[in-house]
Amino acid sequence: VQLQASGGGLVQAGGSLRLSCVVSVRTFSRYTMAWFRQAPGKERGFVAAISWIDTTYYADSVKGRFTISRDNAKNTVYLQMNNLESEDTAVYYCAAGQPLGNWNTIQAAYEYDYWGQGTQVTVSS
């Protein structure tokens, strides 16, 4: 299974970006897909996830600003990021796994088996 993330870049505070992650697997629709991020000097943290039945989960810090979605026909998961803040600056990673559908497991990085290479998002203030 390979994951290829793209869409990062430099944006001003208040701006928007859309990240994409293409997954090379025949059973994409069966996976929960998630986005995590890691800022310099900080641990990797949960951002958002979408289950195989399209239930969505968000970290409190991004609720109302970020939207996760998936297109099973294209084996792709998206992260639409609006009203970006300088605190959103990080490397963003997409991940695929089959965690149980509760909050504790959905946000746990160790529940995800496959990871993309990361894409840098930089928000200037």
Image (spheres, helix red, strand yellow):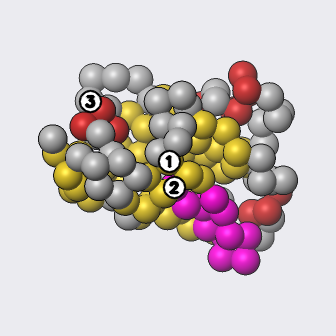
Q: Secondary structure at mark 2?
A: strand
49 on left or right of 59: right
CB atoms of marks 2 and 3 within 8 Å: no
Q: Judge whether residue 115 can be spotted in this image.
A: no
- For residue 125, say whether it is visible: yes
Q: Nearer the viewer, mark 2 or mark 1?
A: 1
Compare marks 1 and 3 and give the one earlier in the sequence: 3
What residue span does the magenta drawing correspond to?
A: 69-79
Tell which residue pokes out farthest to the left in this image: 125
Give the spatial CA distance, label 2 vs label 1.
7 Å
Q: Nearer the viewer, mark 2 or mark 3?
A: 2
Q: What residue does disc 2 label?
A: 79
Residue designated by label 1: 66
CA–CA distance between discs 1 and 3? 21 Å
118 relative to 99, above or below: below
In terms of depth relative to the viewer, which is nearer, 65 or 31?
65
Whether pointer 1 and pointer 3 mark residues with C-beta atoms closer than 8 Å, the reply is no
Residue at position x 33%, y 46% in the image: 84
| Disc assigned to residue 40 | 3
Residue 33 falls left or right of residue 88 = right
Is 14 or 124 nearer to us in this picture? 14
Determine the main secondary structure of the stretch shown in magenta.
strand
In three-dimensional space, the C-alpha distance between marks 2 and 3, rounded to whole angstroms, equals: 21 Å
Percent of width and height locating residue 62: 48, 37
- In the rendered structure, which amino acid carries the disc numbered 1? Phe
User: Which disc number belongs to residue 38?
Assistant: none
Characterize the local packing of mark 2: few (<14), some (14-19) or many (20 or more) Cα atoms within 10 angstroms.
many
Circles 2 and 1 in contact, beta carbons < 8 Å: yes
Looking at the rendered image, the quarter that the N terminus falls into is: bottom right
